[in-house]
Image (cartoon, rainbow, N blue to C red):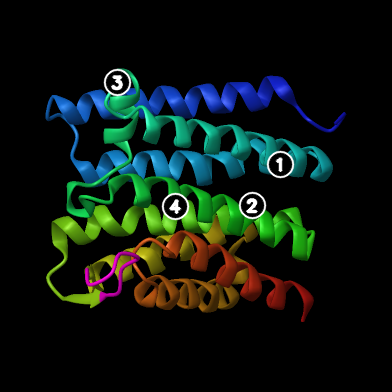
Amino acid sequence: MSNLDWPRILEFVAVVVSVWLLTGALKVVGRLSCDVARKVNHALALAGGAVWFGWLPAASAEASGYAASGLLLVLVGLTCVFRDRTPFRFAFLANTRKTDSPHEALYFWSSWFVSMAGLAGVQLVLGDIVITRTAALLVGIGDGIAEPVGRRWGRHRFQVPSLTRGKLASRSAEGCVAVFASCFLTLLGCFGLMSAPAAAAISLVVTLVEAISPHGLDNLTIPVASAVVLHYFRTV
């Protein structure tokens, strides 16, 4: 318990929830599109969490990350339950799509749960905070940029399975290019220019995994796949 940095944990959770409310309110008045609102919150929780906690001493980063994730998952659950009441309504709208109707709540809590579970599993299995925080950055930034790019500039679309029976989702080649570019630049920022060949290989794996993952599960498959490849390059 001494490894928990409670001031930092509570500050992070407060920032995330505040941005839920802000982006939800902006979405209601038509000042922010659905895909941007969702992905701002996606990137803030994952990439922001990696920056907020990932450079603490390893034991504190791990314990504080688990605690913040647990608190956020509780708040996600409460938001889904009370989604028709203010201020939960704004938080719910900020993290959901009309196209997922009538399963918006399912995609909201499941995407957050699999993200946190995937990263926690990576840390438990590999015990390497560098890999875990990098995986969080990749799913936060790479997956976070794909949907807005795909919705605006995606012309070459393809379908992928969905968590809900009989319902297909679509992704785009343009979104995949954005995933590759953002992951590659993120890895160069983390590890420097000397890592360019490995960064390209890891980015390609992340891009392919994101492209074929069922809608709603890419938040799990991306961090797990990127962690496996990162572990390989850190041990060869």
Q: Earlier in the sequence, mark 3 or mark 1?
A: 1
Q: Quadrant of the N terminus?
A: top right
Q: CA distance from mark 2 to mark 1?
A: 8 Å
The local crowd at label 3, few if under 14, some if 14 to 19, many if 20 or more residues have their Cα within 10 Å, is few
Place of residue 152 in the rendered image (x, y in percent of width and height, measured from the top left)? 15, 56
Front-most of 80 and 177? Answer: 80
Q: Which residue is mark 2?
A: 133
Q: CA distance from mark 2 to mark 4?
A: 21 Å
Q: Are marks 3 and 4 in contact (CB under 8 Å)?
A: no
- Range shown magenta: 160-167
Q: Quadrant of the C terminus?
A: bottom right
Element carrying mark 3: loop
Q: Are marks 2 and 1 in contact (CB under 8 Å)?
A: yes
Position of 22 relative to 70 (above/below): above
Q: Which residue is mark 3?
A: 85
Element carrying mark 2: helix
The local crowd at label 2, few if under 14, some if 14 to 19, many if 20 or more residues have their Cα within 10 Å, is many
Q: CA distance from mark 3 to mark 4?
A: 21 Å
The local crowd at label 1, few if under 14, some if 14 to 19, many if 20 or more residues have their Cα within 10 Å, is few
Q: CA distance from mark 3 to mark 1?
A: 37 Å
Q: Which residue is mark 4?
A: 110
Q: Earlier in the sequence, mark 3 or mark 4?
A: 3
Q: Amino acid at mark 4?
A: Ser
Position of 61 relative to 157 (above/below): above
Residue 86 falls left or right of residue 209: left
Q: Main secondary structure of the magenta part?
A: loop
Q: Are marks 3 and 2 in contact (CB under 8 Å)?
A: no
Q: Nearer the observer, disc 2 or disc 1?
A: 2
Q: Amino acid at mark 1?
A: Trp
Seen at 50% across and 40% down, the residue is 45
